[in-house]
């Protein structure tokens, strides 16, 4: 009889091999079906080639995009050499815009400015807490001195009358206001093309902005370049030029000092940086002297306005500068 006649319908379709025994008994032996075996192989096999093809297509597409961005950069360099500053600026801008990524340079600057505002607020709160703590300690010290004077006539102070001390509980301490718990510098978010490409495009655009006298924009581009590549010497030097043009000599000096630390092999570049640094230090010293003179004039005007009520004038007094300290004394 067939399997279906013995109530074994579907035995053969399920992959069982039926053996008929003497006496009418039936045994089933489990045999791997070729179709099931193929299914298992498919499920256990690695991902098909379609995923790899998709990845390759994405990589090729990004490579093509970066090729276009690089072409814009080359055109910008040619325009810069021809001293066509506006065209160079436009080409570098197109290179920046053609580069894909999770965020733009301007968005990163916004994040940095927000971080700075948060850090400034944290520093102010920390200083306020320190001042409050100092005032509390002064008050407790005065109270302690008053108690000691009041108990001076007593034979001996009570053991329980110990001097109170200021304590700080965990609830009074905010970890956000702890200088050691906060990062000391802003860290740029990761970008696949930030250091290798975008930092160069922004730095080159800054170079084109300098002869156009758009110094604030040049400083921003150098800031972006340095956030993605903190050891980019050219960006430091170009930012120093923009800082000098805006008479921020102290910031320009700081950039050039850092450039000198980074540039250890190019003797010609180091000589130029050192010469510029000396000139900037003289300009900064002159600026500080001028600032002191203006401040003294304002103080003199303020003093005369007050002393005039009493028939006096600061013209009767002489301000003498100490050559060692640079401070002034009135005689």
Image (tube, grey):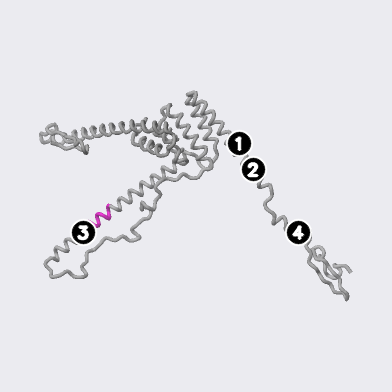
Among the 4 quarters of the image, the one containing residue 231 = top left
Question: Helix, strand, or loop for circle 1?
Answer: helix
Give the mark nearest the N terminus, 4 or 3: 4
Quadrant holding the N terminus: bottom right
**Quadrant of the rendering where the C terminus is positioned:** top left
| Residue that badge 2 annotates | 56
Q: Residue at x 58, y 36 (%)?
A: 65
Q: Are marks 2 and 3 in contact (CB under 8 Å)?
A: no
Q: Is residue 119 above or below residue 69?
A: below
* Numbered disc in front, either 4 or 3: 4
In the rendered structure, does residue 133 fall within the stretch colored magenta? Answer: yes
Q: If you read the primary sequence from the N terminus, does the residue marked by circle 1 or circle 4 appear first?
A: 4
Q: Residues within 10 Å of mark 2 (few under 14, many from 20)?
A: few
Instruction: Tell me the magenta residue range.
Output: 131-139
Residue 291 lies, in percent from the top left, at: 26, 33
- Find residue 37 and name its label: 4
Residue placed under numbered mark 3 in the picture: 141
Instruction: Evaluate if marks 1 and 4 touch, with contact meaning CB atoms under 8 Å apart.
Output: no
The label on residue 64 is 1
In terms of sequence position, does the residue under pointer 3 or pointer 1 come before the other? 1
Q: What's the distance in space between the residues labelled 2 and 4, CA to CA? A: 31 Å
Question: From the viewer's perspective, is residue 94 above or below residue 33?
Answer: above
Q: Main secondary structure of the magenta part?
A: helix
């Amino acid at each position: 009889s067939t399997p279906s006649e013995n109530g074994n319908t579907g035995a053969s379709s399920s992959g069982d091999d039926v053996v008929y025994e003497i006496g009418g008994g039936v045994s089933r032996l489990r045999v791997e079906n070729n179709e099931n075996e193929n299914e298992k192989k498919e499920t256990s096999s690695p991902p098909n080639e379609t995923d790899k093809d998709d990845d390759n297509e994405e990589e090729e597409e990004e490579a093509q995009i970066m090729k276009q961005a690089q072409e814009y950069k080359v055109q910008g360099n040619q325009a810069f050499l021809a001293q066509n500053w506006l065209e160079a600026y436009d080409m570098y801008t197109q290179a920046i815009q053609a580069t894909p990524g999770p965020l733009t340079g301007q968005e990163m600057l916004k994040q940095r400015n927000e971080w700075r505002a948060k850090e400034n607020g944290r520093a102010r709160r920390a200083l306020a807490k320190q001042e409050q703590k100092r005032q509390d300690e002064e008050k407790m010290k005065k109270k302690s001195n008053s108690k000691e004077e009041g108990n001076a006539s007593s034979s001996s102070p009570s053991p329980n009358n110990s001097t109170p001390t200021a304590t700080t509980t965990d609830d009074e301490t905010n970890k956000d206001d702890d200088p050691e718990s906060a990062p000391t510098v802003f860290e740029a978010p990761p970008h696949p093309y930030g250091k290798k490409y975008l930092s160069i495009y922004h730095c080159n655009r800054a170079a084109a902005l300098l002869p156009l006298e758009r110094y604030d924009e040049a400083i921003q581009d150098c800031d972006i370049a340095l956030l993605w590549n903190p050891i980019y010497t050219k960006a430091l030097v170009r930012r120093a030029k923009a800082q000098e043009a805006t008479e921020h000599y102290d910031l320009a000096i700081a950039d050039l000092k850092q450039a000198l630390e980074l540039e250890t092999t190019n003797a010609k570049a180091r000589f130029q940086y050192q010469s510029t640094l000396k000139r900037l230090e003289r300009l900064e010293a002159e600026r500080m002297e001028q600032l002191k003179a203006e401040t003294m004039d304002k103080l003199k005007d303020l003093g005369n306005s007050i002393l005039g009520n009493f028939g006096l004038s600061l013209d009767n007094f002489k301000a003498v500068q100490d050559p060692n300290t640079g401070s002034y004394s009135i005689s």
